[in-house]
């Protein structure tokens, strides 16, 4: 009896076992290379000192940027928080692109909670522009994980198709295929898992230089806090390399839990969810800008053409 495709059953099973591992190895090696690339030394970054929103992106990604903008606008009285935790625009629309996008999200008819605004702004034009600028300056690296996961998925899909084709050909040729079926089950399961995770996105990540810039800025901010510079309204500024105080700076580095007013902080933090950046626990009730809230809560085979006991790889 002629072997299916000219490949003996035991040989095909061995090859197929290697193919089952191959996509995973590709994905792991690719991921390691990307991480090593992010940590590799890069030329010194030139350009303006990072803004508070650039530092927020380095510290916590797009969600932290949104939180920082909300903190700045609430601190300046441009936004207030209602008893239902809806943000409301009470002042003139700001000029900064990030702040402007946040303010637009606080208009009536929108889900103007912190989480609602985060969801709308993650892939917005201003946020993508901010990420691209940081990439151009070597402070963040593009998120290659979705591409890696997509390649792994298509590799597993190809392995599954090859296995199914071998199974059909083996059955048609009256070859034993019993040992191939468990491997096909594994291939099918791996394909389903790869499909489930292939479209998850995390966003750009800081490079080694980006981490160093963030560490220097965070350290400078901590020193300024110890010197008694208040968390007053306004943007983070850079003066002689020192980050000045401000509610926006506190949130940029520490999240909404670091907002100077504890009750406002509790009102702004969305309920906890399993997500990437951001999150936390919350409670709270009505607030107005710059004030406090009224309350808070919280095999083996014998041969190529025949096999003893029932099944090779076709």
Image (cartoon, grey):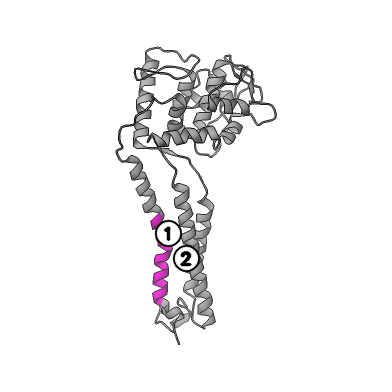
Where does label 2 land, which residue? 159
* Residue 307, placed above or below residue 246: below
Q: Residue at x 29, y 38 (%)?
A: 41
Residue 250 is covered by the magenta coloring: no
Choose between 261 and 56: the one closer to the eye.
Answer: 56
**Rendered image: mark on residue 23:** 1
Residue 261 appears in the picture as rendered: yes
Instruction: Residue at 41% x, 26% y: name it.
Output: 50
Per the rendered image, the range of residues in magenta is 10-26
Image height check: is 14 above or below 236?
below
Q: Report the magenta stretch's main SS.
A: helix
For image coordinates 36% across by 44% down, the residue present is 35
Q: Are marks 1 and 2 in contact (CB under 8 Å)?
A: yes
What's the CA distance linking mark 1 and mark 2? 9 Å
Q: Looking at the picture, how far across and down is residue 83, in whole percent?
A: 66, 22
In the image shown, does 105 or 132 lie closer to the viewer? 132
């Amino acid at each position: 009896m002629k072997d299916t495709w000219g490949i003996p059953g035991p040989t095909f099973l061995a090859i197929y076992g290697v193919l089952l591992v191959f996509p995973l190895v590709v994905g792991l090696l690719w991921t390691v290379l990307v991480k090593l690339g992010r940590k590799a030394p890069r030329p010194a970054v030139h350009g303006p000192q990072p803004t508070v929103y650039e530092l927020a992106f380095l510290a916590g990604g797009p969600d932290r940027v949104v939180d920082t903008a909300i903190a700045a606008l609430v601190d300046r009285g441009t936004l207030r928080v209602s008893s239902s935790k809806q943000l409301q625009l009470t002042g003139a629309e700001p000029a900064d692109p990030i702040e402007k996008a946040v303010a637009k999200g606080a208009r009536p008819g929108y889900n103007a909670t912190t989480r609602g605004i985060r969801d709308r702004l993650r892939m917005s034009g201003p946020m993508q522009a901010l990420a691209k600028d940081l990439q151009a300056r070597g402070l963040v690296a593009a998120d290659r994980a979705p591409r890696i996961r997509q390649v792994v998925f298509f590799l597993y899909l190809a392995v599954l198709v090859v296995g199914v084709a071998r199974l059909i050909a083996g059955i048609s040729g009256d070859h034993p295929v019993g040992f191939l079926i468990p491997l096909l089950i594994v291939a099918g399961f791996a394909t389903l898992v790869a499909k489930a995770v292939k479209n998850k996105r995390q966003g750009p990540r800081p490079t080694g230089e980006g981490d160093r810039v963030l560490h220097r800025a965070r350290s400078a901010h901590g020193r300024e806090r110890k010197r008694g510079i208040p968390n007053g309204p306004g943007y983070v500024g850079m003066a002689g390399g020192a980050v000045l105080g401000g509610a926006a700076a506190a949130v940029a580095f520490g999240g909404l839990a670091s907002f100077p007013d504890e009750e406002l902080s509790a009102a702004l933090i969305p309920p906890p969810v399993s997500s990437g950046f951001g999150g936390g626990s919350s409670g709270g009730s009505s607030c107005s800008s710059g004030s406090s809230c009224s309350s808070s809560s919280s095999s083996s085979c014998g041969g190529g053409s025949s096999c003893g006991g029932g099944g090779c790889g076709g």
